Image: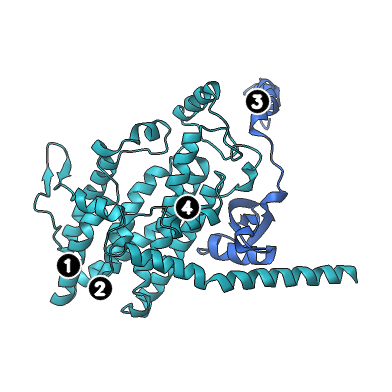
Chain colours: A blue, B cyan
Amino acid sequence: MASSDWPLWEVFVRSRAGLNHKHCGSLHAPDAEMAIQNARDVYTRRGEGVSIWVVKSSEITAADPDDKDQLYDPADTKVYRHPTFYTVPDEVDHL
Amino acid sequence: MSDATLDSKGGAGPAVADDPKRRAAFDARVAAEGKVEPRDWMPEQYRKTLIRQISQHAHSEYVGMLPEGNWVTRAPTLRRKAVLLAKIQDEAGHALYLYGAAETMGVSRAEMLDALHEGKAKYSSIFNYPTLTWADVAAIGWLVDGAAIVNQVALQRCSYGPYARAMVRICKEESFHQRQGYEAMMALAQGSPDQKKMAQDSLNRWWWPSLMMFGPSDRDSPHSAQNMAWKIKRESNDDLRQRFVDMTVPQADYLGLTMPDPDLKWNEERGHYDFGEIDWDEFWRVVKGNGVCNRERLQARRDAHDKGAWVREAAVAHAEKRAARSLAQAAE
């Protein structure tokens, strides 16, 4: 494995306990452990996180952007899935 | 700054011939401030321009460590040394974010580094000027990072998502760079007569090259119109340069330093400072490779890459050993 072949890792950082890990960037590293060490230096130099996940980019399956319309547009017509769709009397509380 | 291989099936594949219908849809989306993500279809020219711009930006961060690195061991106090090290480490990180953003366009980091090392890629000319005194480290933070921030704040609204996101992170980190530079400059400007002289000398040498960082005048920027339409570029070179001048002159006044420009004066009518003409011959001379440090900078980068080869090889050997060990344990 030449250094130029180091796999790419996607980095997820939990900013503090109670919050989810959030994607923050990527980097190259020879293995997962070194990816975490590098991610610590690159993405958490100012207290940005308390936990890091790395995952090989090649392991991620992503939806095709060309399918965007057929995948997500149907939700646009289903407004009854939102609470604001319903009419309820103002004088009734806790709805 | 991410999502790099996620686009391997989409846009980053082999060049797709430009398709007028998709092109029109793309242009309309970008015009409406829609963002472009790695796997989205994009015109080849958009991709090419961004690869060039983002990789040049990455190279600038990467080469930009050298002029400051020159002063790490000679920083006047431990505090300044710790600050300088932190700043230089940030620059390495910024290069990494930007190489990552460029990689989402389907070009590998190794290819980009090869282009830099072979002298085929450009980086910001400002780093081809030497850091002769400690005051130059202060001037770089104040002026060079100050100018870079003006440029990068505008780029946070770039239409290409990964680049815009890298800019947001970089701007956040870079504000300390400018402040530490100004603070260091202030220490000199308010110091002994010799220190003040050193500060003024440094300002004299860095002011004009800092103005050149915004690139050629709008009169001589042939690609600007298309890049503005695609929102790769958000504001013109001359507008950004003017903003930098307006912001920096009062900062110099506070320090009691004088800008090395006899034509500099406040224009009440325009509400901006007028300033003298940039020496464009010098600008093009440095861009074309004949500045004071062009050869030295490139050689330093090549040497660092070659001399660091064993570290990269050792990391790979370590990873392979660890993988073999865990495989053996799994078999037990």
Instruction: Establish whether labels 1 and 3 are both on one chain.
Output: no
Return the residue nearer the eye: B243 or B326. Answer: B326
**Numbered badge on residue B34:** none
Q: For mark 1, does the 10 Å Cα neighbourhood hold few (<14), some (14 to 19), or many (20 or more) residues?
A: some
Give the image location of residue B64, x and y in percent: 38, 62
Task: Judge whether B275 appears above or below A36 on screen.
Answer: above
Horizontal side of B103 relative to B194 (left or right) equals: right
**Quarter of the rendering occupied by the N terminus of chain A:** bottom right
Return the residue nearer the eye: B332 or B264. Answer: B332
Residue that mark 2 sits on: B133
Q: CA distance from mark 4 to mark 3?
A: 31 Å
Residue at x-position 38% and y-position 32%: B226
SS at badge 3:
helix
Of tags 3 and 2, the one toward the viewer is 2
Asked if the residues shown at circle 2 and circle 4 are in contact, with their CB atoms under 8 angstroms apart, the answer is no
Residue that mark 3 sits on: A69
Q: Amino acid at mark 3?
A: Asp
Quarter assignment of residue A87:
top right
Residue that mark 1 sits on: B201
Q: Amino acid at mark 2?
A: Thr
